[in-house]
Amino acid sequence: MSSVLRKDAFDLPEGLIYLDGNSLGPLPRRAADQLSAVVQDEWGKLLIKGWNAAGWMEQPSRVGDTVGRLIGAPQGSVVIGDTLSIKVFQAVASAIKLIPERRVILSDSNNFPSDLYMVEGLINLLGQGYQLKTVPTDALFDAIDETVAVVMLTQVDYRTGRMLDIAETTARAHAAGAVMVWDLAHSAGALPVDIAASGAEFAIGCTYKYLNAGPGAPAFIYVRPDLAERVEPALSGWLGHRAPFEFAESYQPGQGIERMRVGTPPVLQMAVLEAALEVWEGIDMSALRAASIALQEQFIAEIESRVPALCLASPRDPAQRGSQVSFAFEHGYAAMQALIHADVIGDFRAPDIMRFGFTPLYLDADDVHEAVNRIAQVMDEKRYMQPEFQVRNRVT
Ligand SMILES: *Cc1c(COP(=O)(O)O)cnc(C)c1O
């Protein structure tokens, strides 16, 4: 299991235990060098020639293919760009067009708010009687019926880590004739995903969480290959045009997945992503998953025996959990602040969730044990009562 440990590949501060790679992955050492090389040698020296000479224009699909390998997507079916919220809009806008006679977009009421907000905005814009219907996770299967055009779900719940089965859920959506859109924000780089085998039409996700591409890193979108020439892009920007440099007056969708590009790619941030993806070479995703589960199980067992005030808010069955563990605690915000002060970084999600991500690329059993030592200390000493930990920061 130690075969997935790549501690040396990351630049983490000494003594810090980082349990927040599910929110923002740490800095891969290669990324800093690569970024500076691209800034100085490409941007600095090539200037605008870099678009051709340094392959900047191909970067979104080249890097998309590398991300694709981590989610079971074939070559040429993934492209990088924009942010995940934008990709949600893009995927759902194209998905509803595949099934024009239906009007319901179904999602989980626990879905990440931005996904729901983007669909609300899309529906308001369309103004054709579309409806966003949200139900609790347990009611999802029953709610998939012949009125549903699109089922839009995030595989791993950001608060609890609850994980859905992609193949089973997609089959359910397809049985009702609906189009499936998966958000893989907490899946890509966290667990094995075989998006092609599931038959899902669309998948989207971000690269700054488990893929470690840094704050503001761009998102990805997958379109099932047999649909790539059929989908209609709603965000019809020039770089998704069939021939951007013909500067034609009206839009013609580009070839295949290229049509999901919008505007100028974030070259520098994508250079970081490309370097960050090198860490994944030779990583077996099922070994990574096994290592993640081992760390999570150890964490849960140690917390439950030493810190009874914390109440498990994630599914107990590891097969139903992504790569994070959440505990509910009344003073969760202040306790997390106190913990961060003790150099164990997790995060807080309202109303009372303390969330800990497990990324076996740079965490081992000793780290988990030491994290629990520090959590137990914070809790035993009730450090969460200290006034300095009560102040809410803008980002929690
Ligand atoms: C992290 C996350 C987002 C964030 O979207 P951005 O546009 O990258 O800010 C959206 N949806 C889900 C499910 C997420 O986990």
Image (tube, rainbow, N blue to C red):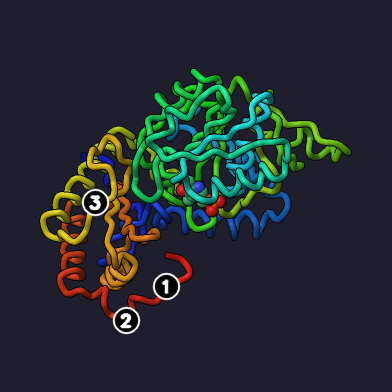
The residue carrying mark 1 is 392
Question: Within 8 Å of ligand 1, the CB of disc 2?
Answer: no
Query: What is the secondary structure assignment of the residue under circle 1?
Result: loop
Q: Residue furthest left?
A: 305
Please tell me which residue is depicted at 12% across the width and 59% down the height of the picture: 306
Calculate the distance from the C-alpha at mark 2 to the C-alpha at mark 1. Answer: 11 Å
Classify 85 as above or below 236. Answer: below
Give the image location of residue 132, x and y in percent: 58, 39
Q: Quadrant of residue 238?
A: top right
Task: Identify the amino acid type marked 2.
Answer: Pro
The answer to whether residue 275 is seen in the rendering is no
Q: Are marks 2 and 1 in contact (CB under 8 Å)?
A: no
The answer to whether residue 330 is seen in the rendering is yes
Question: Within 8 Å of ligand 1, the CB of disc 1?
Answer: no
The crowd level at tag 2 (other Cα within 10 Å; few <14, some 14-19, many 20+) is: few
Give the image location of residue 269, x and y in percent: 56, 53
Q: Relative to residue 175, is residue 104 drawn left or right?
A: right
Please tell me which residue is depicted at 50% across the width and 42% down the height of the picture: 205
Give the image location of residue 262, x and y in percent: 69, 43
Query: What is the secondary structure assignment of the residue under circle 2?
Result: helix
Q: Earlier in the sequence, mark 2 or mark 1?
A: 2
Q: Quadrant of residue 291?
A: top left
Question: Within 8 Å of ligand 1, the CB of disc 3?
Answer: no
Q: Nearer the viewer, residue 330 or 297?
A: 330
The residue carrying mark 2 is 387
Task: Identify the amino acid type marked 1.
Answer: Arg
The residue carrying mark 3 is 312
Q: Nearer the viewer, residue 193 or 94?
A: 94
Please tell me which residue is depicted at 43% across the width and 33% down the height of the picture: 140
Classify 326 as above or below 166. Answer: below
Location of the C terminus by quadrant is bottom left
Q: Earlier in the sequence, mark 3 or mark 1?
A: 3
